[in-house]
Image (cartoon, rainbow, N blue to C red):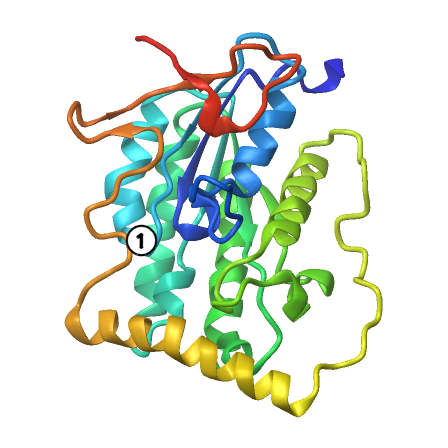
Amino acid sequence: MEMNAHYTSFVAVGDSFTEGMSDGLPDGSYRGWADLLAARLAAAAPGFRYANLAVRGKLIGQIADEQCGPAASMGADLVTLVGGLNDVLRPRCDVDRVCARFEEAAALLARGGGQLVLMRSPGRQGPVLERFRPRMERLFAWIDEVAARHGALVVDLFASHALSDPRMWADDRLHLNAEGHRRVAEAVWQALGLPATADWDAPLPAAPPPGWGARRGADLRFAREHLAPWIGRRLSGRSSGDGRTGAHFSAELGQAFWTTPADHTNPGPVTDWRRVQP
């Protein structure tokens, strides 16, 4: 367990993927891969500190402008940046502009001095992925270049066959479920050079495809509960992240803050961690 003693602090920035949707907890909050990774790191590092600044719905420009400055100032040993997918999934997108803002964000975080980790986001099998694949591949190729310039690690989730399985995704078809987030946490853990505990890209067991009725019922629920509200937000210019701040960002003070477990030998859910006083 001493291999990860170097990582005594971790700050995560990004959108809903890093916020943890849709890995829900009984109290209605989200957990997600970043919280899972933080808990594993904390178990080996007394005094470990963690901050998750990610907010659902944020575009890469918003991540760069709102999250990266506070994150960089925290001086974390480990920093993760995932963003840009909300941009490229929009009907109209200037991919060159998205790439430029992504590099601004990465460069700012890299100046903070910690190990920067970037990701090629996973993609769910289906027509949406195929429609936007060229944009996603342009962004991901750029992320590789940015990583090379700034000494960052890249976790390639886009190439994962397991994470493209629809069974790894929540009912909204936009976010990973609990098992998907668990596998992402393991993928990042291994990318950091830490000992593997599982094959994060192992395929799910084969299962018979759902029948026609089950598929149509799922499609109708998806359209009613997720697609229609999403279209409504797009038409009105609203975002699911409007009025929200990261889990560990104080809107009142205008600054991020650290959290830490009361007992590093049994970290428990990050939602139960205590705030570290400055």
Which residue is most to the bottom? 212
Q: At which x and y percent is residue 220?
A: 46, 83
Q: At which x and y percent is residue 23?
A: 53, 48
| Residue 229 falls in image quadrant | bottom left
Drawn side of residue 10 relative to residue 253, left or right: right
Quadrant, the N terminus: top right
Q: At which x and y percent is residue 272?
A: 47, 23
Answer above or below: position of 123 versus 41.
Answer: below
Residue matched to label 1: 58
Q: At which x and y percent is residue 226?
A: 39, 71
| Residue 166 falls in image quadrant | bottom right
* Tag 1: amino acid: Lys
Drawn side of residue 210 relative to residue 259, left or right: right
Q: 66 or 254: nearer the eye? A: 254
Answer above or below: position of 246 versus 48.
Answer: below
Q: Residue at x 42, y 19 (%)?
A: 259
Q: Residue at x 37, y 51 (%)?
A: 102
Answer above or below: position of 175 versus 190.
Answer: below
